[in-house]
Image (tube, rainbow, N blue to C red):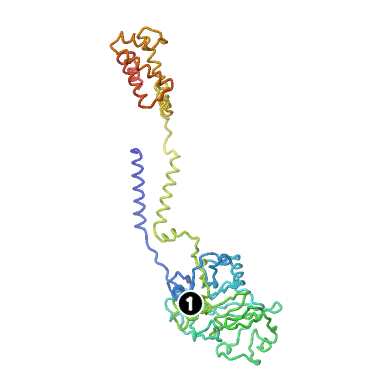
Amino acid sequence: MRQYLAIIVTVALVILLLVAINAASYVEIERAPDSEYSPDRSTYNAGATGTRALYDYLQESGHAVVRWREKPEALLSAGSMRPSTFVVIGSTRGSFETREVESLLKWVKTGGRLVIIDRIPDQRLLPLSGNWNISLELQNYPTPEASSGNPDDMTAGVPLARASQPTALTSNVDSVLPSRFASVIKFYVIQGGASAETEPPPQQQHQGREETEEDDYDLSGKTIRMGAMRQATPPPKKIPGATTSFEDDTPTASPAPVIHLADTAGPLLVDYRHGAGRIIILSDPFIVANNGINRADNLRLAINIVTGAVGAGSGITAFDEYHQGRAATRNQIISYFAGTPIPAMIGQLGLIILVVIWTRGRRFARPLPLHSVDRRSKLEFVASMAELQQRARAYDLAIENIYARTRRVLARYAGLDSNSPRALIAERVAARSQLNRQEIESLMLECEDAIAGESLGARKALDLVARLREVERALGLRMRARENKQAKEK
């Protein structure tokens, strides 16, 4: 452990140095303020362009709302937790993939409500409605200088928008105040490969009067009579359970979009049928954003659009957070430490570990010869055999090796053959020395019993070896020469 002390101290000092460097160099990056040029329409954002105020209000007022952080494919397999309304607000940070668009529209066809609140939505999310094509036209593009934190600047010179007709989406809505960056929704009738724009006349939009056979307006240099348009439309066909708007339960096959809200420039809120569901389009996110939801009746309109104007308990409303950069697959630990020096410190520490691992197999100086071990020492063999016998617990084999040599030495000391009986060897040894004959014979008997297989432990084996060495030492049998030789070899 002592040999690694310098390495441990060095690593600790390096870590402390990295912490000090990161702490000294860390500068908290101020979050850029929300702007209409680069908005964040997430329900997690409490800034000017966020929609957290609407989400919190709906949640606290008893509506079933969730933040949808999975792909749209999960809408088809949500089971009992399947949302009835899916809300996409603003230009999302992540674009919709083709497969996601197909899954989302398939979910709408099965009866879902898709609410799109954007100035320039993804055109793939606006499928054809019969022979009607829907598009949005931006009148005033937001600039980087547009101050979203100043609602008065956002709505400067913008007139109030009023309901085009009494519908469930405009229930209890007197007027709505959009921003000066609101888009205009336009319709295109596709007939024989050509498209003709059929924007409702301004008088119908803002005066709320009924359409007559004499109504006409100019489109693409041509005058189109509204009465002729109605005559060219095929008669409605009955579809069980189908409706064209929220306020009318009469089955009809007309695919024409329904205008709910408009200002002097054109429609701001429309909806149309897609399969068994509906697609609702609001052309200005300012109406539902934190900086504009408290203007006029914007909150009331936002509630009607999102909840379906039937109040709490109408089903689950899901706000798309997956494409706002809040996907559930993101590592929450990394998100928690994002913007702090911790990820940089971990990266630097990992780099140091990789360098240490790499340098362990590299040579930084001239090659040194390996330490040579004297292989001529007999004690090396003895030490190896002793270690093997100790690991294998072969104590009987150790006793046999030592006792066999001691017995031969005792026989020569007594002037007898090595195969003589132990009683005779013990008697002759005792006669020539001052040792007790019974003790010598008893020691020899115990050693022979251990060699023959009697249970023998480490303590007992050590005791027998110690007694054998004591006999050899007492008789002076080659102990001095062996000890001197071993001392020289060491």
Q: Quadrant of the N terminus?
A: top left
Total labels drawn: 1
Taking the image as drawn, is residue 419 in sight?
A: yes
Q: Quadrant of the C terminus?
A: top left
Quarter occupied by residue 432: top left
Image position, residue 91 (x, y; %): 52, 71
| Farthest residue, direction right | 192
Choose between 279 and 370: the one closer to the eye.
Answer: 279
Asked whether residue 181 is in view, the answer is no
Relative image position of residue 345 (x, y in whole percent): 40, 54
Q: At 43% across and 50% down in the image, what residue appears?
A: 350
Instruction: Residue lying at the far top in this picture: please name it.
Output: 415
Q: Toward the viewer: 270 or 63?
A: 63
The spot of residue 63 in percent (x, y) is 48, 74
What residue is pinned by disc 1?
Answer: 288
User: Is 450 left or right of 186, judged from the image as shown?
Assistant: left
Name the residue located 43 percent from the left edge and 33 percent from the top edge.
367
Element assignment for label 1 = loop
Label 1: few (<14), some or many (≥20) within 10 Å? many
Q: In the rendering, at what x and y percent does residue 203 appear?
A: 58, 90
The kind of residue tagged 1 is Val
